[in-house]
Image (tube, helix red, strand yellow):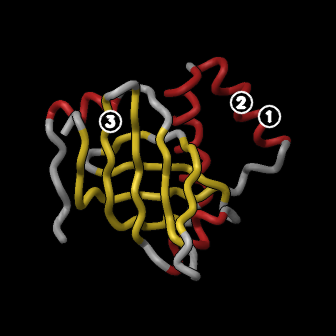
Amino acid sequence: MPPVSLTTAARAFLDEVHFGTLATVNRQGIPSQVLVWYMLDGNDILVSTPAASYKVRNLRSNPWASLSVSEGSQYVTVRGRAAIDEDAERGVALYRQIATRYLGAEAGERWLAQASRRGAAGRFTLRLSIEHIIGTQR
């Protein structure tokens, strides 16, 4: 299935700061969902995740994922295949961008310092290529 271009309304909504719910499927076919910070990159959704996360394990066995973003009665849900970028340096750089997007520069740096102390330095990037979109803002 070819990538889908986002409408102006969907792009504007996803560019706002909202939490997303990322869904993946494990090897047994059981769905897993987790709240994530994300950012839009063209027509792709980027998520920074710990290298050892179940999201990475799930996507290695089944690349399909969905992300649902909502605010009140407004929502956008996208679905597609996700690629895993295992470059830890790029993963940490994306984590910094996303933390700044959600918290601002100063608070984002504090968040990253705390995360580093908790051992969150090894991060991968998930790139969800949007192949289908539904919602009120599509």
Relative depth, front residue between 44 and 58: 58
Relative depth, front residue between 93 and 102: 102
Residues at marks 2 and 1 touching, judged by CB atoms closer than 8 Å: yes
Q: Quadrant of the C terminus?
A: top left
Task: Identify the element where label 2 is drawn.
Answer: helix
Mark 3 or 2: the one toward you:
3
Q: Quadrant of the N terminus?
A: bottom left
**Residue 23 position in % (x across, y down):** 49, 58
Q: Amino acid at mark 3?
A: Tyr
Residue at mark 2: 111
Dot placed on the residue nearer the N-terminal end, 3 or 2: 3
Q: Which mark is residue 75?
A: 3
Q: Amino acid at mark 1?
A: Gln
**Residue 36 position in % (x across, y down):** 55, 43
The correct choice, above or below, for 88 with respect to 106 in the image is below
Quadrant in which residue 73 is drawn: top left
